[in-house]
Image (spheres, rainbow, N blue to C red):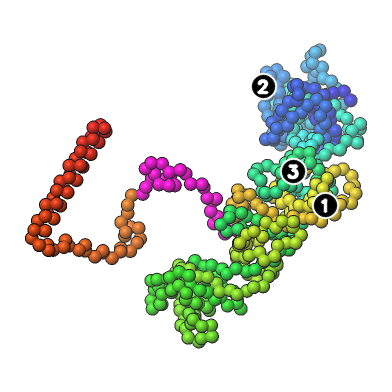
Amino acid sequence: MEPLSFQRYICSLDPATLPRVLRVCSGVYFQGSVYEISGNECCLSTGDLLKVTAVELQKVICEDTETGQTMELPLTFEGHFQPAPALGPHQTPHKPFPKTAKQRVLTLQQVLGLWDRQPQPLLCPAISPHALLLHPVYEVQAAMQLRRDLVKVPSTLEVDVEDVTEEAQHVRFARPLLLSEVLAMKEAMPTLAEILEGPAGPAVFQSAWERRLRRGQWLQLHGRSRAWRVLASAPGSGRHFLLSSAYQGRFRRRPRRFAAVRELAAALEPGRRLRLVVTQDCEGLVGDVAPLAVGDRLEVQGLQGSGAGTRLLCHRRGVEEDEEEGEELLLPLDVSGGFLEEASDSKKYSLEELLRLQPLPCEVRLAAPDPALGRDALAALPALRLEALLDQPFLVGSFCEEPEEGFEIPPRWLDLSVLLSEGPVRPLTPCTLRCRLEELTEAFYYRLLAQLPGSAAQPPPRPPKPARSGTAPEGRRPAAPRSAASAGCLLAPPLPPLPGPPGPSAPGAAGTDSDSAEHDYETVDDSMQKTIHKMQALVPF
């Protein structure tokens, strides 16, 4: 087939013959031409292949051959057309309409159905007494090599094409996929995949395998991981982790700390006793409730009342465990203080057992590291705070050169553009060493924490700025002094008056002391005056 303009080819295309494969012949600039198509840049170079899958009429431009004026006809135009005589010796149409068409009037859709590569002169009294040319504009949907999305190209694109459908039967239009798309294709795995584009954005894990996810790297994709994960942090260290349910380390529970009575109420569980030790004095309790002192031992009984009058019923126990003495307390929920859970549990728990036993968040300590890990990063930490349970889908993968060294990729956090291999894939090497513990980067941890439901995540702490003259250590100017009442503080009791000067022991001694004191004050006054004069001489006023 000889090359045609894209417009002429599309206008004469029979939609029943789709899909068709076209090759770009000419009409582009050196090294390709970039067209803005549906908001995306599309580069068409000579030799590129397009697989046309759909054609849709967008609009029809009507041109008056006498005046040259154009107008857009709605697709619902109800006027009728008839073939017009030839326009002249140099403007003879390529093919006159069939005889059957000349003998009757035609609708707009019938005219477009008789299109044969170039516009034919028509008459329509509803539009103009002159001959008219109709120029339909189609939106062409096509696939391109190594492009994820289908492009939508206007038929007026100024390129020449040729139909190579018959000779391109063997050509496979490979469509890149995102890992998040592969995740839903259970029938496609296991498979091999080539990375076309690495992950965008900041790193997620502080691991060597993530840094190897670059263009050209081949992966083995084994399938979807069935593991769930727990977000954890090491208090005071700034380190954050993601623990897989496959992690085999054992933990011991640590006593929980509470900063308010409301937190105690939230920690109540049916059938479980909550015993506490007060670690901070609680003064000023309302009503006849006695204040709590450091060392008081409480056992939480439950809630009483409703609405604003809700109270937490607690039993203040005696010093000895078996003593019956004590008293009942009704604590308001808005009381702040310090409470430490009394726990004497020395049992070692797996991660799954901990989650069944205790709600999150909670603090634990690693009692036995995971034996499958060469170096368990949790072993050196004095405490670990388990913060949230995550049900994020992961893909199990490995590098083709190291098939047994497995890792798990979260496509929603770490998406890649890949190209799946063609044809059947022989059985992959089993993935036996999956990473069960991943350390997160600080930036991703805070981004993830902010996405958790009900989270009030604080941003990571900033390093202190160097102090300058007239500023506080954090770089702020010193705050103006406030009164004790405005600061919400209680006034301290007044200091006792200073003792008066001792009485004279003898008249002569008293006169000597008085003269000496007056001499000392005069010496100080003279020294101060000299200092002031020097400063006035140095500093202009």
- Mark 3 to mark 2 CA distance (whole Å): 61 Å
Position above or below: 524 against 282: above
**Is 315 a magenta residue?**
no
Q: Does residue 290 appear in the picture of this structure?
A: yes
The numbered disc on residue 69 is 2
Q: Which residue is depicted at the point 17% across and 42% down?
A: 526
Please identify, in this view, whether the residue under mark 3 or under mark 2 is nearer the observer: 3
The numbered disc on residue 163 is none
Q: Secondary structure at mark 1?
A: strand
Residue position marked by numbered label 3 in the rendering = 212
Frontmost residue, 155 versus 86: 155
Q: Would you say the magenta stretch is mainly helix, strand or loop?
A: loop
Please report contact status of discs 1 and 3: CB closer than 8 Å, yes or no.
no
Query: In the rendered structure, which amino acid carries the disc numbered 3?
Result: Arg
Query: In the rendered structure, which amino acid carries the disc numbered 2?
Result: Gln
Give the magenta-colored segment's residue range: 453-479
Label 3 vs 2, first from the N-terminus: 2
Mark 3 residue crowding within 10 angstroms, few (<14) / some (14–19) / many (20+):
few
Label 1 vs 3, first from the N-terminus: 3
**Is 473 a magenta residue?**
yes
Label 1 vs 2, first from the N-terminus: 2
Q: Which residue is depicted at the point 81% across and 35% down?
A: 145
- Mark 1 to mark 2 CA distance (whole Å): 71 Å
The percent position of residue 266, horizontal first and vertical second, equals 55, 69
Residue position marked by numbered label 1 in the rendering = 404
The percent position of residue 131, horizontal first and vertical second, equals 74, 21
- Mark 1 to mark 3 CA distance (whole Å): 16 Å
